[in-house]
Image (cartoon, rainbow, N blue to C red):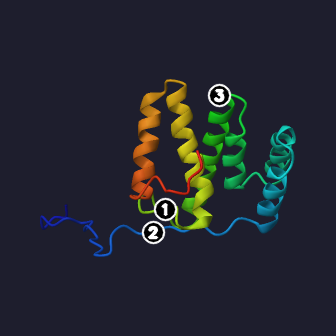
Amino acid sequence: MSRLGRVSNPINLNPSGPPETVLPPEDPQATEALAAALNLPEQEQRAAVNAVVSARPRSLSGWATVGDLGRDNIEAYAAYRVGYHRGLDTLRQNGWRGSGFVRWKHESNRGFLRALNGLAKRAAAIGELDEAERCEVFLRQCDPSWPPTDLSS
């Protein structure tokens, strides 16, 4: 409060709701390399995806895919957690200030949301229920229509 008894940092009421962040598209070469890796025989996919992410460690879709291909809950959890934290960094670099929408309908947001969703599921699988709940709440804060109908499990 100021000396006059007024709030010195007024609340900004936006009639259209919270701001929305749309991440820039991922590097097309990374997207193409991931698609090519996933078109390989199943037993070769994991190593190929890991090679893509090693060459492009900022690829959120890459980290989510590493998590999807994890051999066990801990390996998947670790990959999803990296994708989630890389995603937070990327969101902040693109104007996100800790709140607001990050919607699935924007293809470029999907790597982050997949990593967050995977983290929630794997946290639950290893008994880290408070983390799983935080992730689930965060998903719904990012996109109130969560889960999307086209999300593959």
Count every numbered label the image shows and give the total.
3
Task: Give percent across and percent down for residue 62.
Answer: 72, 51
Label 2 crowd (10 A; few <14 / some 14-19 / many >=20): some
In 3D space, how far apart are the residues under numbered discs 1 and 2 (Cα atoms)?
A: 6 Å
Give the side of residue 75 with respect to residue 89, left or right.
Answer: right
Is the C-beta separation of discs 2 and 3 under 8 Å?
no
The foreground one among 138 and 39 is: 39
**Callout 1 amino acid:** Val
**Circle 3 SS class:** helix
The image quarter in which residue 107 lies:
bottom right
Give the side of residue 10 with respect to residue 6, left or right.
Answer: right
Label 3 crowd (10 A; few <14 / some 14-19 / many >=20): some
Label 1 crowd (10 A; few <14 / some 14-19 / many >=20): many
Task: Give percent across and percent down for residue 120.
Answer: 51, 39
Q: Is residue 139 above or below residue 1?
A: above
Is the C-beta separation of discs 1 and 2 under 8 Å?
yes
Q: Which residue is mark 3?
A: 74
The residue positioned farthest toward the left in the image shown: 5
Q: Residue at x 39, y 54 (%)?
A: 141
In 3D space, how far apart are the residues under numbered discs 3 and 1 (Cα atoms)?
A: 26 Å
In 3D space, how far apart are the residues under numbered discs 2 and 3 (Cα atoms)?
A: 32 Å
**Circle 2 SS class:** loop
**Circle 1 SS class:** loop
Q: Which callout, 1 or 2, points at the residue further toward the start of the chain?
A: 2
The foreground one among 20 and 144 is: 144
Q: Which callout, 2 or 3, points at the residue further toward the start of the chain?
A: 2
**Callout 3 amino acid:** Ile
Give the side of residue 62 with respect to residue 114, left or right.
Answer: right
The image quarter in which residue 12 lies:
bottom left
Q: Which residue is mark 2?
A: 20
Which disc, if any, is residue 102? 1
